[in-house]
Image (cartoon, rainbow, N blue to C red):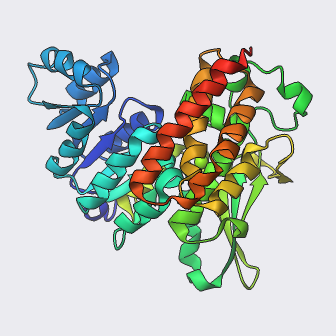
């Protein structure tokens, strides 16, 4: 365990602690014996109470202010202070004193906390990719001089591969994708898939929203924009490669055509650990990669005709301004409707595509207020389309 004491942060804040990545972040903190000073979640849940009792954070913040009041009563016998509402989460970030925060909040609600963490000068271990998709420029401005450590397997891989050369020597980024449960499907076959089919991801254990995004390939579209902002590489220099085994998590090709890739078993906890201990490494929580068991690695191009949200994300990213925020907002609304049985799988493509086309003007608006405005408008317009769709 050489060097272990030197590279662990003195404590960690876990935002979005009841979600899939949040739970895995707590598992890493526990195994590496890193104290947790702040937990945040949206609602009062039995799991959040269990987490408060187990990790004894100084502060627990709930996004839902009403839920915070009843939660405070439930954990009144503990030392944990309860903060309420969106403003409470931001206050908790500045009060918690942790040098690093894992932001694993779902969707657009993660943006303000992302900015708050960066304002406080804390290291940001970022799992909330929507922050970068919607407001990438504002986030990267706020991060100046304060690196963001990505907690997304592809970006964590690229981050590591970029250490093999200089930025001006990068030819392209190779972003791998599992292809999700519907790889190889025709558009006709996609028209009949159900919520249960969609939630059966072949290689990764994730929350419902990102599992749907992974099945539509929207997740990969978001990841192109995420990588573009994080690493300052234009979307046209980022290639998506379907790699079903999820062993190579992404790669960087340099101008001499050397390709540096990062491999491991598919386990998000390695990304969390990397973000917490960087630039050091320590014996970890993830099992070792047995290449003989893996046997072979395969690669294929993405089918952009059948999965139109992938090229749509690239064009929204190129257009810039608040258009990616519209894309994200419409997608959040459409995915929620799909999970609730109010929209078909291919209905997601139509709702997102039509909303982005309708609000194309958003590309000319790049202030943070403008982005928030178009986020709300995108959600509203998408919701109107969902109501009008009468699908399913
Ligand atoms: Mg990913």
Residue at point 9%, 19% (across, down): 76
Q: Nearer the viewer, residue 137 or 24?
A: 137
Looking at the rendered image, the quarter that the C terminus falls into is top right
Residue at point 34%, 74% (across, down): 145
Residue 8 image offset from top left, x and y in percent: 29, 57
Looking at the rendered image, the quarter that the N terminus falls into is bottom left
Q: Nearer the viewer, residue 185 or 201?
A: 185
**Res. 311 visible in picture:** yes
Residue at point 34%, 68% (across, down): 146
Residue 178 image offset from top left, x and y in percent: 72, 44
Q: Is residue 382 left or right of residue 347?
A: left
Residue 159 image offset from top left, x and y in percent: 53, 66
Residue at point 53%, 75% (across, down): 163
Task: Find residue 211 and report its image quarter.
Answer: top right
Residue 376 image offset from top left, x and y in percent: 47, 38
Task: Find residue 41 and report its image quarter.
Answer: top left
Q: Is residue 208 left or right of residue 113?
A: right
Q: Is residue 169 above or below residue 4?
A: below
């Amino acid at each position: 365990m050489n060097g272990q004491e030197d590279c662990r942060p003195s404590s960690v804040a876990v935002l979005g602690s009841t979600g899939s990545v949040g739970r895995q972040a707590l598992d890493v903190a526990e195994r590496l014996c890193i104290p947790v000073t702040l937990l945040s979640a949206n609602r009062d849940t039995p799991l959040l109470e269990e987490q408060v009792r187990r990790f004894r954070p100084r502060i627990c913040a709930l996004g839902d202010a009403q839920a915070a009041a009843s939660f405070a009563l439930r954990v009144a016998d503990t030392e944990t202070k309860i903060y309420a509402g969106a403003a409470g989460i931001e206050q908790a970030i500045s009060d918690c004193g942790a040098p690093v925060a894992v932001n694993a909040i779902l969707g657009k609600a993660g943006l303000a906390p992302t900015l708050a963490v960066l304002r406080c000068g804390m290291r940001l271990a970022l799992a909330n990719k929507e922050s970068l998709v919607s407001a990438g420029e504002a986030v990267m401005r706020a991060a100046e001089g304060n690196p963001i450590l990505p907690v997304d397997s592809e970006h964590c891989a690229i981050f590591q591969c970029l250490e093999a050369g200089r930025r001006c020597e990068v030819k392209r980024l190779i972003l791998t994708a599992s292809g999700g449960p519907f790889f190889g499907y025709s558009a006709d076959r996609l028209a009949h898939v159900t919520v249960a089919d969609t939630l059966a991801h072949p290689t990764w254990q994730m929350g419902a929203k990102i599992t749907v995004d992974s099945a539509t390939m929207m997740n990969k579209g978001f990841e192109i924009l995420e990588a573009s902002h994080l690493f300052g590489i234009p979307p046209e220099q980022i290639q998506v490669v379907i790699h079903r085994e999820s062993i190579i998590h992404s790669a960087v090709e340099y101008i001499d055509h050397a390709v540096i890739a990062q491999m491991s078993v598919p386990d998000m906890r390695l990304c969390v650990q990397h973000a917490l201990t960087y630039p050091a490494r320590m014996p970890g929580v993830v099992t070792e990669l047995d290449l003989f068991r893996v046997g072979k690695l395969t690669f294929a191009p993405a089918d952009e005709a059948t999965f139109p949200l992938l090229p749509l994300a690239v064009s929204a990213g190129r257009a810039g301004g608040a258009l990616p925020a519209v894309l994200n907002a419409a997608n959040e609304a459409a995915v929620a409707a799909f999970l609730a049985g109010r929209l078909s799988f291919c209905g997601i493509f139509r709702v997102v595509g039509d909303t982005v086309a309708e609000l194309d003007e958003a590309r000319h608006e790049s202030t943070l207020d403008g982005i928030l405005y178009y986020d709300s408008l995108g959600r509203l317009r998408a919701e109107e389309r969902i109501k009008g769709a009468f699908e399913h």
